[in-house]
Image: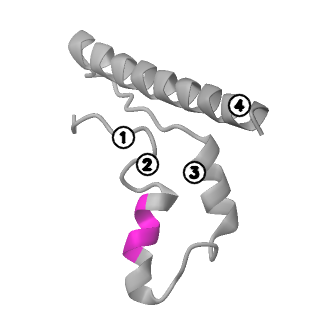
């Protein structure tokens, strides 16, 4: 298993792939459907040989990502309410 991700992109996801496609001349917005899907879909490692320790690591990374995003959205809502 690779190190935990940052909660925003995974190798092979649209944001990661965009960096690779810039070499070919593509820019953000050239793949709107893929970019939209990447913002909503989470790809988790799943295979028969996944150990209990690896499962815990995945679960912890997902929980950390969800917690960070939740607090970020709370902060945005509070900032909007103050306008």
What is the crowding at mark 3: few (fewer than 14 residues within 10 Å), some, or many (at least 20)?
Answer: some
On the rendered structure, is 33 left or right of 44? right
Asked if the residue at tag 1 contacts the one at tag 2, i.e. Cβ–Cβ closer than 8 Å, the answer is yes
Q: For the magenta stretch, what is the residue range?
A: 16-20
Q: Provide the secondary structure element on which disc 3 rests.
A: helix
Relative height, residue 37 to residue 35 (above, below): above
Query: Mark on residue 69?
Result: none
Relative height, residue 59 to residue 45 (above, below): above
Relative height, residue 45 to residue 12 (above, below): above
On the rendered structure, is 71 left or right of 59? right
Q: Provide the secondary structure element on which disc 2 rests.
A: loop
N-term-proximal mark, 2 vs 3: 2
Give the residue number, with chain letter if any, for mark 3: 38
Give the residue number, with chain letter if any, for mark 4: 77
What is the crowding at mark 4: few (fewer than 14 residues within 10 Å), some, or many (at least 20)?
Answer: few
Query: Mark on residue 9?
Result: 2
Q: Disc 2 and disc 1: Cα gap in Å?
A: 7 Å
Give the residue number, with chain letter if any, for mark 1: 6
N-term-proximal mark, 3 vs 1: 1
What is the crowding at mark 2: few (fewer than 14 residues within 10 Å), some, or many (at least 20)?
Answer: some
* Residue located at (33% from left, 39% from top): 5
Percent x, y for residue 16? 41, 60
Percent x, y for residue 42? 52, 37
Q: Disc 3 and disc 4: Cα gap in Å?
A: 23 Å
Percent x, y for residue 48? 32, 22
What is the crowding at mark 1: few (fewer than 14 residues within 10 Å), some, or many (at least 20)?
Answer: few
* Residue located at (35% from left, 28% from top): 47
Q: Main secondary structure of the magenta part?
A: helix
Residue 22, located in which quarter of the rendered image? bottom left
Q: Disc 3 and disc 1: Cα gap in Å?
A: 14 Å
Q: Provide the secondary structure element on which disc 4 rests.
A: helix
Residue 80, located in which quarter of the rendered image? top right
């Amino acid at each position: 298993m690779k190190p935990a991700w940052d909660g925003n992109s995974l190798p092979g996801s649209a944001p990661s792939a965009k960096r690779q496609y810039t070499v070919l001349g593509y820019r953000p917005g050239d793949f709107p459907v893929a970019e939209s899907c990447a913002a909503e879909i989470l790809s988790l490692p799943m295979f028969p040989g996944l150990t209990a320790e690896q499962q815990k690591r995945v679960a912890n990374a997902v929980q950390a990502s969800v917690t960070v995003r939740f607090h970020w959205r709370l902060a945005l809502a509070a900032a909007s309410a103050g306008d």
